[in-house]
Amino acid sequence: MFGRSLALRVASALAVAALLASSTLASGAGPQAPSFRSPVRLGFPLGDDWEPSIAADRFGHVYAFWTHFVGYAGAATGEVDPTCPDCGSPHMDLQVSSDGGGTWSAPRAPFPTTTRQDDPQMVVDPADGRTLYASYMQDNQSSQYVARSTDFGTSWSTMLVEPLSRGTDKDILAVRGPDIYLVYHTLQKIFVSQSHDGGAQWTTQNILGGTTNSQFGQSLPSGGAVDSHGNIYFAWNGVNNTGQAKGAVNLYITKSTDRGASWTTTLVDVSQAPPQCGCGGWDFWGGQMALAVDSADRVYVLWNANHTKHGPQRVFFRSSPDGGATWSPEQDVSRAPVGSNNAFPAIAARGEGDVRIAWMDDRNGFDAGGDDPDARWNTYYRSSTDAGGTWSPEAKLSAYVPGFTYKLASPKDGYLQPYGDYFELDIDSRGKTVALWGEGNSYTGPGNVWFARQQ
């Protein structure tokens, strides 16, 4: 009996030692990068699909919403949408997954029209986790629309928010309960259309207090959220009017604490003139800022900026625990080597301190000039559970898939060009991240939208 007891004690001691050794090895290996499934192309095989928006509800649905081109400007080679062969180019298309992104419905045009539609946005109301909202521009970018679905995107009620006789751009949608806010740019000003009765009535105002913003060639919204107390935040960038709106970029947050009756604006950073590109009279590579709010009302911002004229850009993060009164120190969150270009920030947040971020960079082939034919772009991701105090290792969301001319294989794998002015993240009903971004041959396309979900 004594011998058996001794043997058991020895075996137990050896097992404990093995467990401690295993724990030490695991600890020494450091934290693991978040794991994602291989990316999946959504939309049409030939495209031409760009500027995607993504939303996830609390019932297992994920929604992908994007702009579909058909032979646009002689450059795009997009397929005719079989659900709307007479739709204008571009127009909005939607795909829905009821199993968290495992399988998807066929693409369809939820808002058929023969005129042009642009700049899709899609959000789920955080108050009920179910009601789905979409916004987009129509009538050659001169009218702003908001639509609502209460049956998981099957049917929609559509609201003409603001019919304008001039061009608009970069609508950003933020919702909580009956409060709906749509911010957009027109005439170098930032306007917000708002409803406090679920969309029955709307009012519109210039949220910058009537200023003309004559110093800016463009004033472009880039992020928005409503916290649990009804405070509304919008991020936007003012592109200084230096040679076709390609000057320095002022990055701002504008906030209202009285449901949109009045607004205050805070300058977060100034990015110098962006890397040059052959992308018309605007600022494709220029600084822009994404914004999110967690369940504890902490505000997070993620933006790309440089501090040398035409120099490569980095991606920076800050958080505020008190509604923007004070901010954490600026963090450079990209692990890309100095000299690579970082752009197109995306962010999502949910539980207290839970923030997820993503961006695109060309570390697999520096592109400091903006038109480097050897550029290799990829989409990267990190997350934090302590409001950005510490971060997970990076995860690369994009991957080589044969059959697409813009995707290149190892050793310097990546895609030739980010496709669209933005991409997005959200957090699904399992608490996992879902991401949707665009890749293409060039700024003018063609390209496709790609989806990845966290395992």
Image: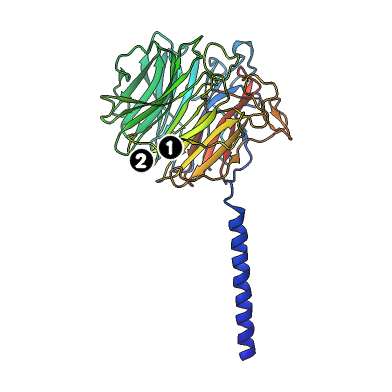
The residue lying at 60 percent from left, 77 percent from top is: 12
Q: Seen from this angle, which residue lies furthest bottom?
A: 1
Figure check: 183 above or below 351: above
Q: Is residue 205 left or right of residue 355?
A: left
Instruction: Residue 95: give x, y in percent of width and height.
Output: 54, 31
Label 1 neighbourhood size at 10 Å, few (<14), some (14-19), many (20+)?
Answer: few
Residue named by callout 1: 329
Amino acid identity at mark 2: Pro
Q: Is residue 54 above or below residue 48?
A: below
| Distance Cα–Cα, label 1 vs label 2 | 12 Å
Marked residue nearer the N-terminal end (1 or 2): 2
Q: Secondary structure at mark 2?
A: loop
Task: Looking at the picture, tell me which residue is in the foreground, 323 or 184.
Answer: 323
Expressed as whole percent of the image width and height from the top left, the position of residue 444 reads 61, 17
Q: Amino acid at mark 1?
A: Pro
Instruction: Indicate the position of residue 117 as horizontal and vertical percent values.
Output: 49, 17
Q: Nearer the viewer, residue 448 or 311?
A: 311
The image position of residue 382, as x and y in percent, is 54, 41
Q: Quadrant of the N terminus?
A: bottom right
Colour pattern of the rendering: rainbow
Residue wearing tag 2: 321
Nearest the viewer among 414 and 250 is: 250
Res. 313 in view: yes
Examine the image and state in which quarter residue 447 appears: top right
Q: Nearer the viewer, mark 1 or mark 2?
A: 1
- Secondary element at image label 1: loop
Q: In the current view of this chain or complex, which residue is farthest to the front?
A: 308
Quadrant for residue 200, please give it. top left
* Res 42 label: none
